[in-house]
Image: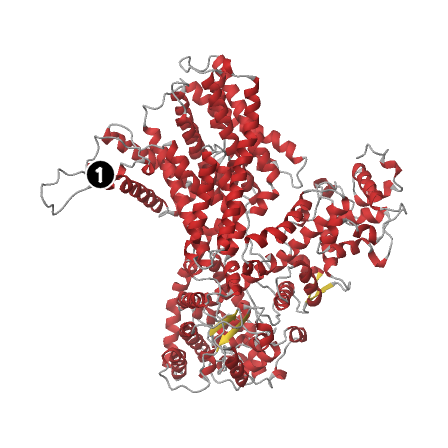
């Protein structure tokens, strides 16, 4: 990959990006190539359409939501730093990372919490910090096959919310969300190896 | 004595015709007298099958004996004990018959003993885990085995060249390579036997175990290639032969896998059409899997691989297609066969070792081999792991590597292969046999004995089992989708990408083709988990005697939250319907006091102590049976059946533990039986017993219909049965409802007793045994008094809330935990026997619906402190909760949700639960 074009130095702001995301130069370069390949009209940024044209993403039940998460706050353009920032959530957690981290610094993007937050905001469409029953139902509708009826979906949604809901507000807050997953190895389940 | 016992030991190997001794028959009688014989002794005619049966019996008895003492089996793996037993038995045979008999015959081993074990492991292999680690498994299986074979063979040859092996061992480099190839493969039987007891974490287990299964192909190829090379003579081996050898590796492994997959496909397809002949479903599974094995064996492909792939590939579809009973049958038969085969293998191994005529000892060779297999195994693991860790998301750490190296057990496969060697071609065969025996014994006994302490000492991550929750399942799916999407965005087609592809393909085509439509329709993993949770709750509810649940503020074992919404779930309805006792738990409030809790504890102890869970389970079973048998032709229903017991099958790894848990539970309950009785007696002496007695009668009256009971009893009895409407048009059998009603009496009676005791302020010793002595605060007392089984006219809001608080938390901690664990135990009697859910077609919807509302006034709603969110979420909930307090007596079991859910429009396509109101009104 790296052989095709020169070095990572060509990427604008490569140092700050690297610092923020923790990606290696090689990964950044690879992502940069990918970024430019996705940018069909060479406009320097990605639009929703660019991502929507990735074939497999269209079939992904959560595809739209994941695309949305690349465009925070309703923006229409995705520049390279933003692109990398989102992908940085899926960088595997390095063992070394924990030791020498400056407590002043914000948590790395690939921390467990941030990984979970990424997943959480896929559910929480209205951004109120809670997954309501309605939101849960929407996700379930996407994920569960057509063969399950609406009634069944509703009962699943109810039960799912109940299961995680601890304070009884009928919705799952982020805290409850993390709690319901505390036994799961998120670091492993939300990481992609090639994104070192 | 010995003579009499001898026939038992004359075991021709699995009827393979291994015994041709004309000299035996110690038990055979004299000639039959001429003419009509009154009695004839025909030992010869039954000899072979008789001995096989006895052999298996001996093995099974041995197993039982071993497990009589937990101490022994917790320290010593069963395989070790079996080998030692085999040694003893072999010694006896040798001493009596003056020659060793009944050893492990390669033919028997490969054709009869090995397939069940491999099928079992393939079928119950956690496929997700397996494929997640497929890279590592393949590496270890292929590269690792090749490495072990060549290094061990070469090193032994070097040892011989160095003069450390006695010159009488006539073997060249090829012979040693052949020996290396057969001794290097990690043995699935041995690994399974030992690792199943060790409980290391899943990743580690799947890697070692997967390796042992998949390396069969490599072993077979290496063995065959080397064998033919040796037979050809090293001088005649051409370069093309080496190429052929390499090519045959692919042919044998891929061919074996392909055969397995073809048969898996056939099997899945066949089971799709067994709807009307359920009885042969289990047989089909075994037949086709065995056919896969034999076919692969016939084509000299890797038979182990074939069966593994067959089991792995077909499970998903077969499980969805076959009936619940068939699934249980498959599971148990498979486990039984595998366990039998394993037992026999280890015993025979022990016996075989006794026969000194077959082997010749050479210390240099034996010690050298032992050292080399350990050394090169460790070295190979370290090297491969280093490479693999470059690619693995979660690297295998040092401790994992130690366990993997040390877990490389050799077993019966190696032994069978070495026995198969041709002595004329390989002059050193006897030495190889001896070495193999020593290696197998060493690895199984020494390593098997020490691996548990080692794992403990190294603090290897153990496997931790937690019950699946809906959230976990849902989020896990989300994660999968997210990762697949991110891989798409990044443009890297990695594992997640392909898995996603496969799942889509499977969903679109394969499942459609291989699953019957009914099964396919409801097949969804999230739905599945939901379904299983419901069933678990339902069963645990039944197991607990139905006292735990509340209709609105349901607190389920699987659900930590205390708030609840109406849901169309078995749980919910069962809860409501189970007995009158549950009604006092309706609403959850936060008023708590230690006293309340104690009361609740008592209540539950008493409830649990009466030992009715089993009873109930039995009844429920019957109920299920009725339902099942009465429900032919219900597409939907079958779907449920298909998915309902998945967890029973998937968790077999935990079986043993669960069994124990269950036993403990039962014991505990029995222990609490006494105190309960005592309390009841006290209660009865008080002025109140009349009521309790009446209640009990009421419960019984339902079935007997002899009692002139007040109309309010109706509610209770009528609602006793929970009905799951699967298809709205189904007819249900009436007796099912009655069966369940019967058991309710127990609960009610108990609960009543408790409450009375409490009210009377009986003093008692420990919480565990007796109720708390103190004065009951007004509201709880009231609550107790107004427990549903008594006429409910009190201050509903007050008592309901307090009662709830008392009971729910305690339930969760004590009774629920027990019941859940016992529920989950696959092997525990109630679970295994009882189909996990009640599925009753509604009796007649119309009449029931019309009846139900009569009993359910909804005007009491305001008196309930009912969370608004709940109310809004659960449509029918507020209604139900409201009416309950008032109608407790009448309809403790009344379904609330049925009204909404069973409305004609919804009933057809979804399943819902309904109470069977039995026409009492």
Number of residue marks: 1
Mark 1 highlights which residue? B44
Q: Is residue A85 visible?
A: yes
Residue B216 x, y percent position in the rendering:
50, 33
Q: Is residue A104 visible?
A: no
Depicted B185 relative to depicted B165: above or below: below
Depicted A105 relative to depicted A156: above or below: above
Identify the image's colour scheme: rainbow, by chain, secondary structure or one colour.
Answer: secondary structure
Quadrant placement of the C terminus of chain A? top right
In the image, B854 versus B612, the foreground residue is B854
Task: Tell me the crowding category of disc 1: few under 14, some 14 to 19, or many 20 or more residues within 10 angstroms, Cα based.
Answer: few
Instruction: Tell which subunit mark 1 falls on.
Output: B
Judge left or right: residue A129 versus residue B121. right
In the image, B523 versus B883, the foreground residue is B523
Residue B493 x, y percent position in the rendering:
71, 42
Q: Secondary structure at mark 1?
A: helix
Judge left or right: residue B722 versus residue A190. left
x 60%, y 85%: residue: B860
Residue B640 x, y percent position in the rendering:
52, 62
Quadrant placement of the N terminus of chain A? top right
Quadrant housing residue B95: top left
Quadrant housing residue B381: top right
Depicted B861 relative to depicted B237: above or below: below
Judge left or right: residue B34 versus residue B518. left
In the image, A172 versus B423, the foreground residue is B423
In the image, B546 versus B318, the foreground residue is B318
Residue B674 x, y percent position in the rendering:
37, 68
Judge left or right: residue A147 versus residue B823. right
């Amino acid at each position: 990959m790296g052989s095709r074009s020169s070095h990572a130095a060509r990427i604008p702001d490569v140092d700050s990006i690297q610092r923020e995301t923790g990606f290696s130069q090689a990964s950044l370069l690879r992502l940069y190539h990918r970024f430019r390949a996705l940018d069909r009209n060479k406009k320097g940024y990605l639009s929703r359409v660019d991502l929507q044209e990735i074939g497999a993403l269209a079939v992904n039940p959560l595809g739209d939501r994941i695309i949305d998460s690349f465009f925070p706050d309703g923006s229409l353009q995705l520049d390279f730093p933003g692109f990398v920032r989102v992908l940085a959530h899926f960088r595997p957690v390095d063992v070394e990372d924990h030791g020498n981290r400056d407590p002043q610094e914000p948590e790395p993007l690939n921390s467990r919490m941030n990984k979970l937050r990424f997943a959480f905001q896929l559910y929480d469409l209205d951004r109120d910090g809670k997954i309501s029953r309605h939101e849960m139902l929407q996700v379930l509708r996407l994920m569960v096959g057509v063969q399950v009826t609406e009634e069944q979906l509703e009962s699943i949604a109810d039960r799912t919310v109940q299961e995680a809901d601890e304070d009884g507000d009928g919705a799952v807050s982020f805290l409850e969300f993390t709690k319901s997953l505390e036994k799961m190895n998120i670091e492993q389940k939300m990481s992609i190896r090639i994104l070192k | 004595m010995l003579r009499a016992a001898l026939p038992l030991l004359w075991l021709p190997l699995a009827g393979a015709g291994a015994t041709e001794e004309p000299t035996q028959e110690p038990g055979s009688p004299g000639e039959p007298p001429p003419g009509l014989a009154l009695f004839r002794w025909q030992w010869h005619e039954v000899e072979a099958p008789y001995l096989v049966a006895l052999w298996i019996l001996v093995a099974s008895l041995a197993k039982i004996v071993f497990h009589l003492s937990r101490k022994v089996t917790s320290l010593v793996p069963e395989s070790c004990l079996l080998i030692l037993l085999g040694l003893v038995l072999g010694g006896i045979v040798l001493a009596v018959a003056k020659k060793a008999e009944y050893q492990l015959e390669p033919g028997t081993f490969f054709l009869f003993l090995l397939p069940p074990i491999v099928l079992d492991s393939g079928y119950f292999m956690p496929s997700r885990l397996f494929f997640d680690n497929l890279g590592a498994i393949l590496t270890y299986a292929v590269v690792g085995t090749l490495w072990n074979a060549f290094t061990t063979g070469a090193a032994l040859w070097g040892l011989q060249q160095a003069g450390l092996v006695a010159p009488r061992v006539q073997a060249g480099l090829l012979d040693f390579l052949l020996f290396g190839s057969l001794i290097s493969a990690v043995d699935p039987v041995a690994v399974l036997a030992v690792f199943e007891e060790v409980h290391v974490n899943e990743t580690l287990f799947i890697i070692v175990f997967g390796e042992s299964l998949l390396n069969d192909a490599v072993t077979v190829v290496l063995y065959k290639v080397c064998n033919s090379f040796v037979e050809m003579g090293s001088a005649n081996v051409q370069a093309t032969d080496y190429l052929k050898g390499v090519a045959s590796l692919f042919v044998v492994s891929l061919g074996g896998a392909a055969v397995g997959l073809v048969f898996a496909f056939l099997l899945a397809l066949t089971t799709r059409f067994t709807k009307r002949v359920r009885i042969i479903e289990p047989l089909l599974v075994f037949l086709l899997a065995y056919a896969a094995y034999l076919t692969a064996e016939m084509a000299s492909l890797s038979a182990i691989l074939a069966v593994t792939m067959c089991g792995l590939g077909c499970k998903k579809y077969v499980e969805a297609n076959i009936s619940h009973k068939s699934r249980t049958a498959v599971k148990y038969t498979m486990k039984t066969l595998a366990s039998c085969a394993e037992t026999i293998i280890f015993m025979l191994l022990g016996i075989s070792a006794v026969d000194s005529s077959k082997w010749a000892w050479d210390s240099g060779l034996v010690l050298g081999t032992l050292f080399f297999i350990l050394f090169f195994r460790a070295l190979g693991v370290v090297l491969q792991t280093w490479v693999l860790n470059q690619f693995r998301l979660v690297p295998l750490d040092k401790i994992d590597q130690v366990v993997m190296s040390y877990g490389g057990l050799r077993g019966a496969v190696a032994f069978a292969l070495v026995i198969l060697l041709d002595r004329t071609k390989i002059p050193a065969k006897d030495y190889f046999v001896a070495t193999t025996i020593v290696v197998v014994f060493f690895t199984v006994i020494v390593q098997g004995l020490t691996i548990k302490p080692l794992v403990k000492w190294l603090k290897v991550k153990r496997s931790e089992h937690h019950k699946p929750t809906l959230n976990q399942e849902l989020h896990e799916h989300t994660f999968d989708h997210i990762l697949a999407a991110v891989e798409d965005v990044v443009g890297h087609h990695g594992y997640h990408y392909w898995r996603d592809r496969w799942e889509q393909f499977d969903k679109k085509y394969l499942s459609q083709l291989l699953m019957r439509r009914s099964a396919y329709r409801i097949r969804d993993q999230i739905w599945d988990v939901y379904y299983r949770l419901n069933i678990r709750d339902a069963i645990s509810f039944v197991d607990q005697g139905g006292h735990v649940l509340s209709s609105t503020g349901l607190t389920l074992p699987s659900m930590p939250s205390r708030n609840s919404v109406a849901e169309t779930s078995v749980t919910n309805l069962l809860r409501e319907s189970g007995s009158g006792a549950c009604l006092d738990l309706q609403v959850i409030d936060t008023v708590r006091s230690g006293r309340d809790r104690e009361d609740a504890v008592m209540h539950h102890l008493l409830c649990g102590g009466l030992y009715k869970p089993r009873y109930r389970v039995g009844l429920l079973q019957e109920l299920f049976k009725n339902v099942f048998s009465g429900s032919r032709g219900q597409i939907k229903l079958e779907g449920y059946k298909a998915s309902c017991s998945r967890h029973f099958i998937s968790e077999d790894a935990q079986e043993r533990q669960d069994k124990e848990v269950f036993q403990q539970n039962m014991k505990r309950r029995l222990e609490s039986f006494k105190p309960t009785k005592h309390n009841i007696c006290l209660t009865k002496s008080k002025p109140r017993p009349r009521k309790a007695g009446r209640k009990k009668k009421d419960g019984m009256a339902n079935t007997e219909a002899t009692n002139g009971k007040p109309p309010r009893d109706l509610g209770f009895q009528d609602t006793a049965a929970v009905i799951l409407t699967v298809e709205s048009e189904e007819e249900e059998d009436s007796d099912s409802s009655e069966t369940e009603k019967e058991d309710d009496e127990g609960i009610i009676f108990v609960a009543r007793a408790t409450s009375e005791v409490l009210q009377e302020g009986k003093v008692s010793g420990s919480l565990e045994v007796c109720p708390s002595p103190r004065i009951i605060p007004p509201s709880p007392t009231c609550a107790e008094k107004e427990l549903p089984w008594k006429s409910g006219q009190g201050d509903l809001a007050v008592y309901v809330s307090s009662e709830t608080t008392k009971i729910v938390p305690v339930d969760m901690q004590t009774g629920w935990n027990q019941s859940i664990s016992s529920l989950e135990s696959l092997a525990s009697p109630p679970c295994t026997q009882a189909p996990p859910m009640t599925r009753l077609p509604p009796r007649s919807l119309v009449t029931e619906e019309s009846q139900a509302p009569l009993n359910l006034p909804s005007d009491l709603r305001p008196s309930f402190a009912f969370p608004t969110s709940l109310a809004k979420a659960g449509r029918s909930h507020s209604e139900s909760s409201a009416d309950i307090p008032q109608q407790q007596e009448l309809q403790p079991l009344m379904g609330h949700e049925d009204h909404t859910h069973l409305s004609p429009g919804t009933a057809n396509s979804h399943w819902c639960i309904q109470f069977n109101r039995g026409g009492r009104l």
